Image: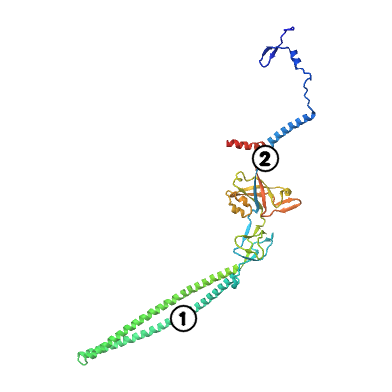
Amino acid sequence: MRGPFAVPVLWNIRLKRWSFMLFRLEALDAQKRSTLGTVLLVSPLSMRLAAAMALLFCISMGLFLTFATYTKRTAASGVLLPETGLIRIYSPQAGVITRLDIVEGQHVTDGAVLMALSSDTQSGEAGGAQRAISLSIKRRQESLSQEIDETLALHLQELEGKKRQVAALETEQQKILAQIDLTRQRLALTKGLAERYANLQRQDYVSRDQLQEKQDAVLDMRLRGEELNRSLLTVRAESARLRAELVELPFNQSKQLADLRRRLAENQDRLIESETKREIFITAPTLGEVTAIAVSNGSRVDSTRPLLSIVPADAKLHAELYLPSRSVGFVRTGDTVMLRYQAYPYQRFGLQPGTVSSISRTALPADEVMTLGNVSEPMREQGPFYRVTVALASQTIDGQGMHERLRSGMQLDADIMQERLPLYEWMLEPLRGIGKRL
């Protein structure tokens, strides 16, 4: 529609239809114009650069959070020990070191004398108590030796005496046999005489009293013969008893002498033990290097504390770490370990790599671990510990022109490297944990 009263028709986008406008476009444009002019947006170069840098920073942060990773790690403390074990030498008893033949780091052979230990304890008037015990044992030994000699002499006398008794009984037996033979002959004569008197009495040539006398004589001879037979039996029984004793005598003597000799041998053993206790020589059980000497000449020692330690020859060192139960759950064999030796500051010598080679299946009591010096008193409250063995990448340490061999017993701190996570996962992990709890 044209003319001064024409009404413009425009497409209404919101209503999606044609609509009539109350005012002309020229009137609307005139109202938009300001006396100050149109708004002009100014964009300086510095603002553009700042915006570009902010955009680049946001992109970089996004890429960093997406591709950068974070490695979980478990902190632990431990000690260097030989793979074959550290040999600790203890004193078999309390005493005083009288001689020390070794120095720190000395290499010793199997059976080499390390030190001498005296167990003599001064006991006032008697001097060395162990020496007094040895003297007492020696006197007892001399007494037993003398008793053995006397027993041998008594046994010989007893044997000769019994032999003489047997010979005397043999002689007496022969005499009794001879008397028995004579008694038999006299009995025969007496019986013959009594029979003749009996014939004469029947003829009244002799009286009855005379006959009775002859008969009494016969009875006396018979009684005499019985007595001689009883004496013969007694002599034979005594002779048999003595012969049996002669047979048993060597066995009884041997038994008695064996008992005395056994007591003498026991006494000799006690004497040797006593003399041994007076001065004991501590020897090396194997070839190795002496370390951690804890005594000196004149030191008093007992059997509860180690005198020294020996590192076996050619033994490689490994690290033993001790982890509480709350830290050992995700440690696996083959995990990388970064070690920091307390004797060599890591700021100057760096971190030393290692690999977890084994993990104990059972926990060790804190008291047992503390004997190795691997756990401090505050850590003791964390309960039992698991032993984690770490194989070292190198048996030496280099730094600042130094090339040092690692030593057994060195304390260390370690970080056990575990799973690797992207940074965004690590940042979102607390939120994930909250979600699981909810």
Does 153 sit left or right of 371 as displayed? left
How crowded pointer 1 is (Cα within 10 Å; few <14, some 14-19, many 20+) is rated as: few
Disc 2 packing (10 Å; few <14; some 14–19; many ≥20) = some
Q: How many labels does the image show?
A: 2
- Identify the mark at residue 70; answer none if there is no mark: 2
Q: Percent position (x, y) of residue 198?
A: 23, 89
At 30% across and 84% down in the image, what residue appears? 223
Q: Residue furthest bottom?
A: 205
Q: Which of 198 and 7 is in front in this view?
A: 7
Viewer-side residue, 306 vs 202: 306
Residue type of the residue flagged with mark 2: Tyr
Residue type, numbered disc 1: Glu
Which callout, 1 or 2, points at the residue further toward the start of the chain? Answer: 2
Which residue occupies the extreme front position in the image?
35
- Asked whether, in this view, residue 420 is left or right of residue 402, the answer is left
Q: In the picture, residue 63 is in which quadrant?
A: top right
Quarter of the image with the N terminus is top right
Q: Answer yes or no: do the residues labelled 1 and 2 have beta carbons within 8 Å?
A: no
Q: What element carries label 2?
A: strand
Which residue was labeled with disc 1? 160
Q: Nearer the viewer, mark 1 or mark 2?
A: 2
Q: Which residue lies furthest to the right in this view?
A: 45
Residue shown at the point (50%, 79%) measured from the top left:
153
Where is residue 111? Give x, y as percent. 64, 63
Q: In this view, does 385 lie above or below 218?
A: above
Secondary structure beneath dot 1 equals: helix
- Counting from the top left corner in percent of width and height, residue 179 is at 35, 86
Q: Residue at x 61, y 53 (%)?
A: 369
* Distance CA(mark 1)–CA(mark 2): 104 Å
